[in-house]
Image (spheres, grey):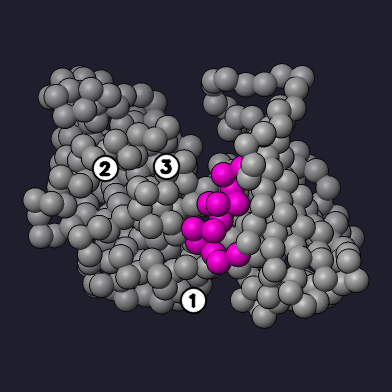
Amino acid sequence: MAKTKIGIVGPGTIGHKLVWALEKQDDMEFIGGAKTSPDWAARWINRKGHKMYAASKEGKPGLPEAVKKFEDALGKENVGGTIEDLIEESDVIIDCSGNKIGAKNKSDYYSPYNKENNEKVGVIFQGGEKTDVGKSFNTRTNYDECKKVAGTDNPYLRCVSCNTTTLARVNGAIAEAGFEIDFLNVSLIRRALDPGMKGKIILDDIEVGLNLPSHHAPDLQTVMEVEAYSRAYKAPVSLMHVHDLQITFKDKAPTKKEFEKIFINDNRVALLETASNTAELKERARRLNKLDARLFPGGDIILAVISSGSYITLREGKQAWVTLMCPQDSIVLPENIDAVRALTYDRNPVERDETLGKTDSTISLDLMKKELEESYKS
């Protein structure tokens, strides 16, 4: 079976981690990345043994000059051409460019290419793009719907945001276990900036989002049929987001034992009985990596985390209240890998449970879950 050839546009915060994950898949091949600048991230791609492709902030007119700039900085042997060449050589593009640039890339490059060619390039966008850029995707909740996009004239998926991914993983598993959700209330305490990033930050302040609901509840509803409400707060931290989640059920909420049973074999959700703060969680992941290189590379947790010690039931057992932790800079990695399989279902039919197991195993999520949960046992 031929491997699916993957190009990454914007191999930054999420994209460079996808390179690591893609290299572990036996049915996929990472063939190169595209950026507008031949910076250290581009040199990192070259040192990994892959070619870089030139993009330009000026769009197509700027591509010839961009190629020359890349060849001068990286060497001709390390440059594969332009972003258009990368699209031509790829079966699937994962666009991680951010700041709504993915939508512009779609209008400038992906849509024109697919209109002109019988062989379509599938494209996976990230959650920062608007919902109309492609069909919203989450493996747990709507994989079967998304695989219908494969082979069509609109082969575009959008992996929902880190916060939505966390909510979908957790609430999707609860609903799948037979506990019918009436509605969700979630308050999100959001990080101000990704680790190591420069930009506008807040200091000595907590911002309250006044637009209700925040975009998170409507985003969840693009991948899961559920009534949901959300409010977001921004705090001066960078490590991860925290969700204060209240779930009201149509019948009874699961008891704590029933709740924990739902996630026993779910490799993408960790139940941490004594977890109470994000800094310790991140540091523990780093230390576990020093025990075993397969665990949390670079401190990337990847798992949705449930502080199971916070779980209680209210309103005569019809409501559950629990805290979740969302590692925003790494949690969507597995879903991007699964989205590749959904987008190529017409050529290589892989069902939902198969891709869940395959992805989890290849990037060692099963081992990460086991070791992290063990470290937090009371």
At 75% across and 71% down in the image, what residue appears?
249
Q: In the drawing, does residue 114 fall left or right of residue 249?
A: left
User: Is residue 219 located in the magenta-colored stretch of the structure?
Assistant: yes
Label 1, secondary structure: give it.
helix
Q: Nearest to the eye among marks 3 and 1: give it.
A: 3
Q: In the drawing, does residue 312 fall left or right of residue 371?
A: right
Which one is nearer the viewer's eye here, 286 or 198?
198
Magenta-colored span = 214-226
At 80% across and 76% down in the image, what residue appears?
252
- Residue type at tag 3: Glu
- On the image, numbered disc 1 is attached to which residue? 353
- On the image, numbered disc 3 is attached to which residue? 129
Which one is nearer the viewer's eye here, 366 or 134?
134
Q: Callout 1: few (<14), some (14-19), or many (20+) C-alpha neighbours within 10 Å?
A: few
**Visible in this render: residue 139?**
yes
Quadrant showing the C terminus: bottom right
